[in-house]
Amino acid sequence: AIDVASFTLADGREVAVEGGWRGGAGEQAFLRDIHSGACDTFYTVLGPDADAQHRDHLHLDLARHNGRGNSRYCR
């Protein structure tokens, strides 16, 4: 698993999960697109809407946490 707190864009701007998730429209859209796209690749994706522990980062995990090992958890 990896935890991602921010992204540095090609133009040098930084988009932080903690401020951007509920920040300006552009930052929100960028972070929510990343979150949504990660749900296609990772089995567990947790962001600020999941719980207080993930308010400042995206948690991306390849581990399969259910008994059958085939479901995804994206919050």
Image: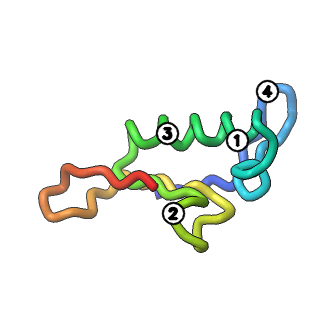
Q: Is 50 situated left or right of 18 in this image?
A: left
- Return the disc, 2 or 4, that comes first in the chain's sequence: 4
- Disc 3 target residue: 36
Callout 2: helix, strand or loop?
Answer: loop
Q: Position of residue 46 (x, y in %)?
A: 49, 58
Q: Amino acid at mark 1?
A: Gln
Callout 3: helix, strand or loop?
Answer: helix
- Disc 4 target residue: 10
Which residue reaches farthest top? 11
Numbered tag placed on residue 12 in the rendering: none
Q: Amino acid at mark 2?
A: Ala
Q: Nearer the viewer, residue 40 or 8?
A: 40
Q: Residue at x 75, y 39 (%)?
A: 27
Q: Position of residue 13 (x, y in %)?
A: 86, 36
Q: Is 62 situated left or right of 53 in this image?
A: left
Counting other residues with Cα less than 10 Å from the Cα at mark 4, is it few (<14), some (14-19), or many (20 or more)? few
- Disc 1 target residue: 28
Tags 2 and 4 touching, CB below 8 Å: no
Q: Amino acid at mark 4?
A: Ala
Q: Position of residue 56 (x, y in %)?
A: 68, 62
- Return the disc, 1 or 3, that comes first in the chain's sequence: 1
